[in-house]
Amino acid sequence: MEKLFSRFADAVSRWTGRPAAFALCILAVVAWAVSGPVFGFSETWQLVINTGTTIVTFLMVFLIQSTQNRDGAAVQAKLDELIRSGRAKNDFIGIDHLTESEVAEFREMCARAKERSEKRTVAA
């Protein structure tokens, strides 16, 4: 089920990110607007666009979030591998799983290391 959803989410994300999808949405809105006089700008006419956009937005939030979660996890895995195989400190591997305050400590440690490096550069 998870792989099926991932493939579906990827396909929808790719399709909806294309100019043709945007053009189709514009066309739908224009068709709705042009049909206003035919339906007397009724509440039902307004409800059609409101309901349609709400449903599409609601569903797209989950598809986009799924795609971004997987992309973010893949980037983190790649960065972890670069850290592991390079000269960087292995302490940084997996910091994406820490709390905000724990990550802030790492950032402060990096800022202090940068300051020390700059002082050595100036002194040399």
Image (cartoon, rainbow, N blue to C red):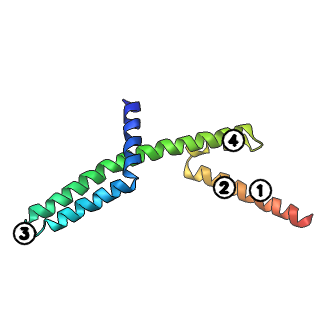
Mark 4 or mark 2, whichever is nearer to me: 4
Seen at 65% across and 40% down, the residue is 80
Per the model, the C-alpha gap separating discs 1 and 3 is 68 Å
In the image, 39 versus 3, the foreground residue is 39
Per the model, the C-alpha gap separating discs 4 and 3 is 62 Å
Task: Please name the residue that numbered disc 1 is placed on.
Answer: 113
Task: Please name the residue that numbered disc 3 is placed on.
Answer: 40
Residue 52 is marked as none
Mark 1 or mark 3, whichever is nearer to me: 3
Seen at 82% across and 63% down, the residue is 118
Amino acid type of the residue tagged 2 in the rendering: Arg
Amino acid type of the residue tagged 1 in the rendering: Ala
Task: Point out the tag, 4 or 3, that comes first from the N-terminus.
Answer: 3
Placement of 80 over or under 122, stated as above or below: above
Give the secondary structure at mark 4: helix
Residue 37 relative to residue 80: left or right: left
Amino acid type of the residue tagged 4 in the rendering: Leu
Q: How crowded is mark 1: few (under 14 residues within 10 Å), some or many (20 or more)?
A: few
Percent position of residue 77, x then y: 60, 39
Task: Please name the residue that numbered disc 2 is placed on.
Answer: 107
